Amino acid sequence: MTFEFKPLDFAQLPEAVQMPGYDRKALKPRIVHIGFGAFARAHVAMHLHEALEAHGGDWGMRVVELFGSPELFDRLVENDHLYTLVETSDDATNTRILGAVCDNQHVARDGIEALVDGLAEPQVSIISLTVTEKGYCVKNGALDTDNPMIQADLANPTAPKTAIGLIVAGLAKRKALGNGPVTVLSCDNLPHNGKLCGISIRQFAQKVDPELAQWIEENVTFPSTMVDRIVPALTDESRAEIRKALGGQVDLNGIICEPFRQWVIEDDFKAGRPQYEAAGAQLVADVEPFEEMKLRTLNGTHSFLAYLGFLAGIETISDCMADPVYAEHARKLMVNEQRPTLDVPGDVDLVAYADMLLKRFANSKLKHRTWQIASDGTQKMPQRWLNSVRYHMDKGTDHSHLILGVGGWMNYIRADRNGETYEIQDPMKDQLAEIVAKHGDDRQAYVDALLALDNVFPADLVASEAFTSAVYGAYAAVADKGAKQAVADLG
Ligand code: CS2
């Protein structure tokens, strides 16, 4: 199927499609958002849109990309930066046009200098980012100075290639121009995302210019946030759904997602903020309990289903939920193995939370691919599973689902599903492929080589014979019995 671009004719949209009700001419780029993928369109920019619907004002968003081609951004301009959001479930569908974005910059079209200058503009109060786990270039809690892109940026800090390098260059310019404080707002799925982002940026700045690092201490805050909304990557099928919702018009920047969304934000903004609470965001003093709850329960179960479902030939999360074996063990993972590890405020009911997540996972309109969630496992496993494993090992309690997840991942990265190959997406994919090639025929050596990846598997876990032999057992169970049987055999 091909979808030809044509600027949207807003006058011809079906009546049910809501247009923005606020004065878009008043918008200025007061927020610069780096990484405008599906999630940012459906979550971060949507919250701003709703804040503007409630209160108006000038909080517009400039979106910025460091990778890929500027084609979609050019098309965004042709639609006056308006794009479609379709929120859908098995019960209802709602379509609206979002309007908070007012400008864009793409490095391939505008050049890096324009992006750096953009961050330094005086009216910019927030620099937000969705660059995925790997975009923070952090290893074991510190800036990863072995990362070749970070090395390149440190050698040439005025022409950065990473988001971290770009932000530091922008802050340096801000300092030089005297353009005042700013907030850097991480919106990625990492525990303590603001804190980690701050560590990465501060350590980078310290290496480039200690005075800049000092200025950052005084002028920049890094609030943490918990972000939640299931937004699958676009497929031709979802593009066709968007076209249907628009009465036949094509919007290549449109997005489909679930109706649910949650945003918990640490209220620590250095230069003001939009009234995000008008969009339902929760502004709190401490985000950590919410982050851990979501990462372990939602994302941890997503990853479990992704590896063990994909290997069994199940293509989407809702198809996993339609299979009683996967549905039962997804719930057991959440309730029996993740829930006890969490320390949440007294009024949060983690069983009800788990049941709500299972309902969200069952949304058959989403077509959220197991293969998509299986990407970047080396970046996701520690916070989704391994911290919980440590909790159970200390207590001597059951964590067989978590371990089977790890065994599933070790099978998955072999890129062989009953003779069918598939693409592995992971920043460490070359290293993983080398391990498969070198040790793939010797189970013990293979598992050992993977457990030796010290930025994935913490040393204290790997030092435990109980852990390594459990992982070996899980790897063998999936390889010998098949993923579905291995899941069914869990207690
Ligand atoms: C998913 C997340 O792809 C993944 O790793 O687990 O993108 C998930 O859909 C979101 O975090 C939901 O908020």
Image: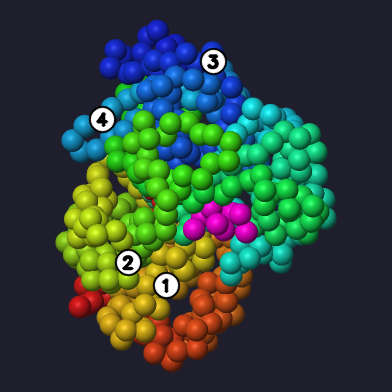
Q: Secondary structure at mark 1?
A: helix
Looking at the rendered structure, the kind of residue marked 1 is Asn
Seen from the viewer's position, the closer of residues 51 and 81 is 51
Q: What range of the chain is rendered magenta?
A: 192-199
Tell us which disc is closer to us: 1 or 4.
1
Mark 3 or mark 2: whose residue is earlier in sequence: 3
- Residue in view at x 58 percent, y 36 percent: 271
Looking at the rendered structure, the kind of residue marked 2 is Leu
Mark 1 or mark 2: whose residue is earlier in sequence: 2
Label pair 1/3, CB-CB below 8 angstroms = no
> Where does residue 490 sit, x and y in percent of width and height?
23, 76
- Rendered position, 211 above or below 122: below
Q: Which mark is residue 376?
A: none
Instruction: Look at mark 1 in the image and give the residue it sits on.
Output: 387
Label pair 4/2, CB-CB below 8 angstroms = no
> Where does residue 236 sit, x and y in percent of width and height?
41, 35
Mark 1 or mark 3: whose residue is earlier in sequence: 3
The residue positioned farthest toward the top in the image shown: 11
Q: CA distance from mark 4 to mark 3?
A: 30 Å
Instruction: Look at mark 3 in the image and give the residue it sits on.
Output: 26
Instruction: Look at mark 4 in the image and give the residue it sits on.
Output: 93
